Amino acid sequence: MRRRLLGALVAVAVLGAALAAVVVLNGVDSPSRTPGDGIGVVASAPGSAASASGGTRGRDLRFGLSFGDTLTWMTDAELAKAMDDAVELGVRWLRVDLSWRNIQPDSPSQYVWERFDRVVEAARVHGLDVLPTLSYTPRWAADPNCASTSQTCPPADNGRFAEFARQAAERYAPKGVRTWEIWNEPNIKPFWQTGPDAERYTALLTATAHAIRSVDPDAYLLLGGLAAVDTIPSRQYVSHKTFLAELGRLGALKQVDAVSYHPYTYPLLPSTETATGTRFQDIDRTKDNLVAILTRYGERNMPIWLTETGAPTWSQGKAADTESARGTSHVTPRLQAEIAGDTVTAAAAIPSVAVVFWFSYQDGGPETPTSRKSQHYGLEYYDGRRKPAFDALEQAIRAYRERR
């Protein structure tokens, strides 16, 4: 819910203790509104006195699966199986690309909503919530500097992207989709082809946020998931901390309710700490960490959603089987399982983390000498066989809930 300059905090209880909404008012220490199972449901807001105690009581860490652009292309049987597996895992959220390129692939007058309609309906039937990632530009609408090279080219006209987002919210809010992530990894060139540009992303974010809230004032909005990287000018990478600080300076944080972040740590376990700091430590323990940056810009209690984390397996080359392995780009199925279970433990220990998503559900292809590492983050192999990580994640989520 958008901030109102009233200088006070109003808490509205709905349907007893199970449903609540926090209306955020002006003030440096105002907690951000936090959805639970669907929009507007709050347990203890991350950063609150209840969650800061370090225990799990009073705090409801939630879990999700990040699917990318896969669910929309599944057959009905494959989609049903994916939903069943999500329920079995104990996750509640499904992060799915809602690609503008898929909806209006060829012209501004064309709309192809039907594939995403199927995903929303399947999730509803299974009692699951959908987090659409609004992103990816059709060639006809892309910046001419990169229109012919990639769907991750930003739009030439922010207004056109915002109108796509408005129509998506108008279509899916009545179906229960009221939480949105605006773009993916805008701080690295692979997902912002003209090169990271905090001012340009802020302009896109602002236009899109206003468009969504014009049809759903209570929509819950996430910053585009920040890639956890160092600043590397030659690759056009800007670190997650530098980019977040720049967004804070530009006022972008006033447009959203939560930060989205992608802390991959493999072969290290997410709970492992090092002298120089890991991507998980960057959340609230390293110098100038994400929480410190949020505090600097008046958003100390803004929740952080880990909308991607995980580790790839691969049969090609040397795979890490321990945290101390060096010179590898992937892990064994055994170590992936250990990382999956530890992800729950690590996320639960960080009060500011509200939701943690595993990437991904299923490998994108068979393991061959020509396949890419990025295709093998799944909890299942391409042929549907489960990796040990599936059971490890399910057991860790169940154990967390039992402790609560």
Image: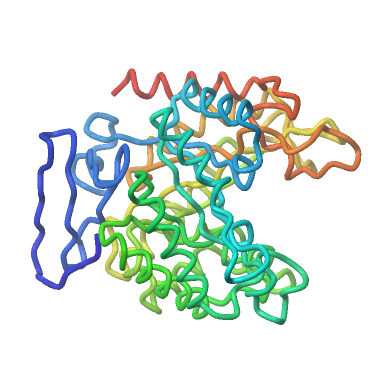
Pick the front one: 199 or 173: 173
Question: Residue pushed farthest right?
Answer: 369
The picture places residue 382, in percent across and down from the top left corner, at 74, 30
Determine whether, in the image, residue 364 is placed left or right of residue 23. right
User: In the picture, residue 217 is in which quadrant?
Assistant: bottom left
Q: How is the image coloured?
A: rainbow
At x 46%, y 78%, the residue is 203
Q: Quadrant of the C terminus?
A: top left
The picture places residue 370, in percent across and down from the top left corner, at 90, 42
Above or below — where is 1 with respect to 153? above
Pick the front one: 377 or 135: 135
Determine whether, in the image, residue 79 is placed left or right of residue 23. right
The picture places residue 326, in percent across and down from the top left corner, at 76, 41
At x 77%, y 43%, the residue is 373
Determine whether, in the image, residue 95 is placed left or right of residue 44. right
Q: Quadrant of the N terminus?
A: bottom left
Above or below — where is 120 with respect to 152? above
Residue 278 visible at all:
no
Count of numbered badges drawn on the protein = 0
The picture places residue 157, in percent across and down from the top left corner, at 55, 80
At x 24%, y 29%, the residue is 57
Residue 79 visible at all:
yes
At x 80%, y 44%, the residue is 372
Above or below — where is 16 with respect to 184? above
